[in-house]
Image: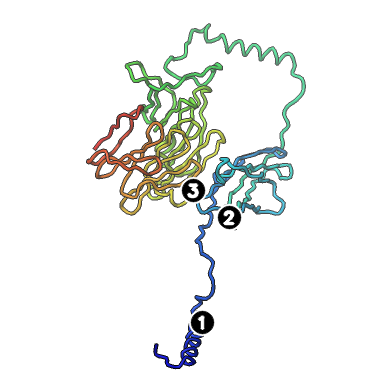
Amino acid sequence: DRFRNQDDKAYAEEKLKEINIAFQVLSGSSIRREPFEARVAPQPVAYPPQLDFGTLQVGQRAKLKLQIGNLGGPAESVGYAYSCSNPWFQLSKGTRARADQPFPIDFEVAIDTRRLQPEQSYREWVEIVLDGIPVRVELLAKTVAYRPALQGPITWRWSVAGVLLLIAALFLPSFMRVPLPSNILPGALLSARPAYELRSNEMLFSVNEGESAILYVGLDDASTPRRLGFSGEEAVGTQAGQSIAYLDGTPGSKQIYLFDLAKGQTKQLTRDSAQKRDLAWSADGSRLGYLLGDGDALRIGIYDLRTSQEYVLPGEVSAGVEHFAWSPDSQSLLFDLRQGDEQRVYRMGVHGDELRQLTHFDSWAGVWSADGTQILVGTENGLYRLSSTGQQLHQLTTVPAHSFSWSTDGQWIAYTT
């Protein structure tokens, strides 16, 4: 104790307290601060990003489905805005697609053409806003004048003529003894039963006939392949939906077509100029996936047969895809993305939600096990197995692995090196 006089000591202690208080005030340390927590903003995405109602007669009403996902942080509020003050469309109240998760949210966009002028093209937009962050969806429609259906009695002469034509169509081929070729799938005069049914032991392939690649379906035995009677490439079939999807068109501008085996009818699914390849059905036959674009712009396109709508998996994270694979439950996709000179394997929900990076090393071509609980990835150091959540990593081989797949019972893995 350097102070002999107690008054001097008390005075020094008081001054020291004042100095400490002044320092705290000047430095701000005396102010109590609330804990700071960084908040990630939501990132709304729309599927599809554009709703095209096509051509409608004035007075006609129509609805299309719209789904909003969120690739960012949690959202506290959901709002919307229209491009015009008196819109000809209306957004329904949103409902959760999954009861246990806030996103995605399903909406219906309904249009009423009674206030629209005929022979016009209309383009508007609706914005869905998550905590002030919007995502815009374009709405397209064309109108034509109302054309009432023909009404009134049909004379008996036309009725008799129609009956005679029907009888001729049914019996004339047998009278003339001109049978249809047995190896061609008929596209007309179909009964209510399917014209043909895909089976698990059949394969689809193309055969060059002149300047066209004609599609065939054949068994894995020595029986004669069945000629489908139309041209196409990269055909893939689904037993669940009894349909065949394929590419056809001019080089550099091929479109996706769908052949319905039950009806014998062909429908064009896409009309844009982007390149398409690697068609693949979901296991339940409800969606068709494919790679869309070229080079670093490759993305995953999805066509939903239930809604007849096409959408592209959203966000920059899905650009530059090298490969994708459907999960056995048809609800998720594995895909590769380039990171510099390397690749990483990701998992994403079919609506663009639940994005997860599964590998953090150079790896590619993820494939699912039959039960969906495990995946395989290839690397230059060998084949790896991990859980579908990206955990429990196990190295299976020590040589580079490519073109690998599981056996149906999950006991064997085939691959090339």
Q: Position of residue 35 (x, y in %)?
A: 52, 64
Specify few, some or many for label 1: CA neighbours under 10 Å numbering under 14, 14-19, or 20 or more.
some
Depth order, front residue of 174/266: 266
Q: CA distance from mark 1 to mark 3?
A: 55 Å
The C terminus, quarter of image = top left
Question: Label 1 belongs to which residue?
Answer: 21
Residue 147 in the image: above or below residue 30: above
Q: Position of residue 168 (x, y in %)?
A: 59, 11
Q: Which label was assigned to residue 314?
A: 3
Work out whether mark 1 precedes mark 2 in sequence or the reverse, and give the earlier one: 1
Residue type at tag 2: Pro
Dots 1, 2 in contact, CB < 8 A: no
Question: Label 2 belongs to which residue?
Answer: 134
Which colour style is shown? rainbow
Numbered disc 3: secondary structure: loop
Numbered disc 2: secondary structure: strand
Residue 51 seen in this snapshot: no
Residue most extreme to the left: 399
